[in-house]
Amino acid sequence: MTIGGTQAYGEASYWDRRYTQDQSPFDWYQNYSALSPLLNLYLSPSNRLLVVGCGNSAFSEGMANDGYEDIVNIDISSVVIEAMQKKYSNSSKLTYITMDVRNMSAFQTGSFDAVIDKGTLDSILCGDNSKQNSSMMLEEVRRVLKDNGVYILITYGVPAFRLDLLRNAGNWNIKLHIIEKIVTGVRYEGQRKWELTNPFPLDEDGKSLEDVFGKNPDIHYIYVCTKETCI
Ligand SMILES: C[S@@+](CC[C@H](N)C(=O)[O-])C[C@H]1O[C@@H](n2cnc3c(N)ncnc32)[C@H](O)[C@@H]1O
């Protein structure tokens, strides 16, 4: 499934309706097992983690099963959060809270080691007032992170459409990772052109990406942004 067009992906009402109609768990873009080697590189089991726009994906369950101990999940849709609270009521590692990522005032400044975003900035960018909403979101993400904490953004957005957005939100050290898309449930095995855990050289015009993957490649981009503070 891809995000595109002008649907109201930034609206709680759109997501409430969608999660009411279809309650089966769904992971956008990639699942936990595909991304775990990369997450394990940047995160530690004792980290306090925040998953923004968690939806009903099994991603956080995968992390908990892998040993991550404190995973706070938020979503703007109360429908999906209530379902997830019920589903994981016995898990001491997983917390689910209805919250708008643009206003996380319930969380203290500098209270998370990492923020994980799979498809939520993308949704906001597809909604109305995308510029204002995305900068509110990124400002909040940055605020709740500790110094040297990481924002891990998993997206379909190419560097030309994501780097400026990120840089405008503050001083980050940004690393880019690449993963092939899963096509009809099967990854393009044998066609892996770049190792997931190896950062891809960042260039602004995407020339190096095109050299390796060709035009319009079937890949997802993972921006690992470390919060740096000016001295
Ligand atoms: C594309 S889905 C991704 C869901 C999940 N992260 C995944 O990877 O399967 C985007 C999610 O962001 C949530 N969302 C959209 N706008 C939001 C906002 N302002 N604050 C919090 N969550 C939001 C939606 O309810 C939806 O669950």
Image (cartoon, helix red, strand yellow):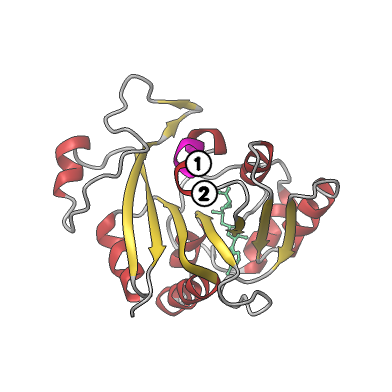
State the residue position of label 2: 43
SS type, badge 2: loop
Q: Is residue 109 left or right of residue 21?
A: left
Q: Quadrant of residue 163?
A: bottom left
List x then y, in percent, for residue 137.
50, 73
Q: Depth check: give the residue in front, 88 or 199.
A: 199
State the residue position of label 1: 40
Give the amino acid at mark 1. Asn
List x then y, in percent, for residue 179.
37, 38
Q: Determine the main secondary structure of the stretch shown in magenta.
A: helix
- Label 2, residues with CA under 10 Å away: few <14, some 14-19, many ≥20: some
- The answer to if 37 sits in the magenta stretch is yes
Q: Is residue 160 left or right of residue 4?
A: left
* The magenta segment: 35-39
- The answer to if 103 sits in the magenta stretch is no
Q: Residue at x 50, y 41 (%)?
A: 40
Depicted 72 relative to depicted 181: above or below: below
Depicted 112 relative to depicted 3: above or below: below
Q: Ligand 1 appears in which quadrant? A: bottom right
SS type, badge 1: helix
Q: Residue at x 27, y 56 (%)?
A: 159
